[in-house]
C-alpha cells in the first residue's frame, strides 16, 4: 500500500513538472513578433483598443520583446562562457537605472497612444499584477522559513 502511494505521489510530481516545463518551453521558443502579437491582443481585449492603437501598441511590443530576447541571449551567453559573476553595487545601480529609464519611456509612450480611461485601466491592471507577484513571493518565503 505504501509503495503504491509513494509511486502515485512521484508520478503526480513528475506530471506536474513536465507540464510546467512544457509550458515554459513553448513561450521560450516564440519569436518576439509572436509574443508581441499575443500581448497586443490581450491588451486589445482588456482595454478595447481601436485599429490605430493596436498598430502602435504592436510596434511598441515588438521593440520590447526584441530587447528582452537580446538581453536573455546576452545573459545566457555569459553564463555558458563562465563570464557570469555577481554584479558590483555600481553595476546593479546602472542596470536598475537603465531598466527604470526604459519603464518611464514606455509609460510616456503608452500615455500618448491610449485614452485617459484606457491608461488608467492599464495602470490599475499592472498594479494588480505586481501586488499578486509580490504576495506570491512573500508567501513562498514565509512558507520556507516555517519548514526550516
Image (tube, rainbow, N blue to C red):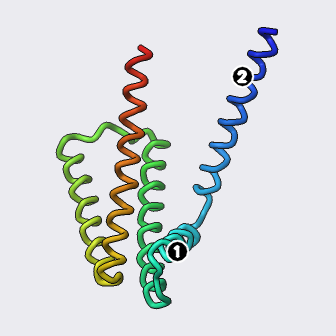
Counting from the top left corner in percent of width and height, residue 45 is at 52, 74
| Residue 8 horizontal side relative to residue 51, left or right | right
Looking at the rendering, which quadrant does residue 74 occupy? bottom left
Counting from the top left corner in percent of width and height, residue 113 is at 35, 83
Looking at the image, which residue is at 51% across and 71% down?
36
| Residue 96 horizontal side relative to residue 132, left or right | left
Counting from the top left corner in percent of width and height, residue 68 is at 43, 61
Marked residue nearer the N-terminal end (1 or 2): 2
* Residue under numbered circle 1: 45
Counting from the top left corner in percent of width and height, residue 116 is at 29, 80
Looking at the image, which residue is at 45% across and 80% down?
59
* Residue under numbered circle 2: 9
Label placed on residue 20? none
Looking at the rendering, which quadrant does residue 142 occupy? top left
Residue at disc 2, secondary structure: helix
Looking at the rendering, which quadrant does residue 4 occupy? top right
Amino acid at each position: 500500500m505504501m509503495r503504491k502511494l509513494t509511486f502515485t505521489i512521484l508520478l503526480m510530481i513528475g506530471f506536474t513538472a513536465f507540464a510546467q516545463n512544457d509550458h515554459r518551453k513553448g513561450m521560450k521558443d516564440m519569436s518576439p513578433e509572436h509574443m508581441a502579437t499575443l500581448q497586443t491582443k490581450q491588451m486589445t481585449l482588456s482595454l478595447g483598443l481601436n485599429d490605430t492603437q493596436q498598430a502602435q501598441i504592436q510596434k511598441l511590443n515588438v521593440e520590447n520583446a526584441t530587447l528582452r530576447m537580446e538581453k536573455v541571449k546576452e545573459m545566457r551567453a555569459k553564463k555558458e562562457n563562465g563570464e557570469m559573476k555577481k554584479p558590483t553595487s555600481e553595476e546593479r545601480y546602472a542596470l536598475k537605472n537603465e531598466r527604470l529609464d526604459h519603464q518611464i519611456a514606455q509609460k510616456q509612450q503608452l500615455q500618448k497612444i491610449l485614452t485617459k480611461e484606457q491608461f488608467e485601466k492599464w495602470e490599475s491592471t499592472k498594479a494588480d499584477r505586481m501586488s499578486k507577484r509580490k504576495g506570491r513571493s512573500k508567501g513562498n518565503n514565509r512558507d520556507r522559513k516555517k519548514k526550516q
